[in-house]
Image: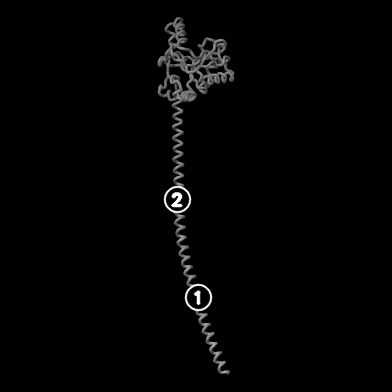
Amino acid sequence: MNSELAKTSSLNFFILLAVAIIVTGSFAYSVYRYDKVLEDTRSEFSQAQAQFQSVRENLEARLASTTEQNNDLIFLLGARNADFQNQIGEMSEKISMFEKLWNTDAELLQKYSKVYFLNENYIPSALSLIEQELTYSKTKPVQVHSGIKTYLESMVRAAQADGIDITVFSGYRSFGTQASLKSQYTVVYGSNSNRFSADQGYSEHQLGTTVDFTTKKKGEELYGFDKEPAYKWLTDNAYRFGFILSYPKGNTFYIFEPWHWRFVGLELSSDLHSSGKRFYDMPQRSLDQYLVKIF
């Protein structure tokens, strides 16, 4: 009985041992397979990660290149747009200049006085009465070109504010008025009238931009105006209002006329004043360049 029990126990032990070996082997194999799968998975992950990094770096490089190209395009577009705007601005300025020239009387800077001729049909584009208080005659109105009205009135008021006795004696004269005036002078002075009075069509007064000044003291007697403080003031200040002395001492057209002043615009009058040049000594082509800036 004991011998059979012992055999049975031995058999059971070997069975258990065999089962244990099988189970242990299966577990070890399972662990091995798990490690293998994990290793393979890690390898695949590493490869995938490397590929992802490569793709990412490539995309980042392409994005950087595209961004740089976009920035270059934006810069180029901005530069071209600025150039285009400048061209538009320059074209607009030229168009405005041509429009202004087109609408500005080309006669206003011509050299008349025995040189150029204004026919009997010429009348300034617009005429205006200057303030009566600024004229010598309180009953006879004085007209001037509308473009110089403000400049003239400002100049006379500035002189009067400085304590200078000065008034406007005459302004615009038509072709017919000049013809009548010249006839009167010719009757009185004969051919000598040509030394101080222009024939009709050659008078700056027909432009409407020229005035004669006097003082309360001088009245209608204009000769000797250069001895008056008004002449000294005009010599020093008239250019600031766009006026120049047409016939200074030594001119080849008429006698010295210190009372006779012509509006030529601020820029030309300032340039003539600073350079010491005379209007009638300048080439007509040079004078015409100031026409667009006369008003």
Disc ID at residue 70: none
The image position of residue 39, as x and y in percent, is 48, 70
Pointer 2 or 1: first along the chain: 1
Question: Where, quadrant-wise, is the N terminus in this rendering?
Answer: bottom right
Badge 2 vs badge 1, beta-carbon distance below 8 Å: no
Work out whether 224 lies above or below 278.
above
Disc ID at residue 66: 2
Could you say whether the residue bearing mark 2 is in a helix, strand or loop?
helix
The residue most toward the top is 187
Q: How many marks?
A: 2
Report the side of 204 relative to 140 (left or right).
Answer: left
Q: Nearer the viewer, residue 221 or 288?
A: 288
What residue type is disc 1 on? Ser
Q: Nearer the viewer, residue 263 or 60?
A: 60
- Residue 114: quarter of image: top left
Work out whether 62 lies above or below 118.
below
The image position of residue 177, as x and y in percent, is 47, 10
Which residue shows up at 43% across the image and 25% down it? 289
Q: CA distance from mark 2 to mark 1?
A: 52 Å
The colour style of the image is one colour
Nearer the observer, disc 2 or disc 1? 1
Q: Nearer the viewer, residue 212 or 8?
A: 8
The image position of residue 38, as x and y in percent, is 49, 70
Which residue shows up at 48% across the image and 74% down it? 33
What residue type is disc 2 on? Thr
Query: Dot 2: within a 10 Å radius of its alpha carbon, few (fewer than 14), some, or many (20 or more) residues?
Result: few
The image position of residue 204, as x and y in percent, is 46, 15
- Residue that mark 1 sits on: 30
Query: Dot 1: within a 10 Å radius of its alpha carbon, few (fewer than 14), some, or many (20 or more) residues?
Result: few
Could you say whether the residue bearing mark 1 is in a helix, strand or loop?
helix
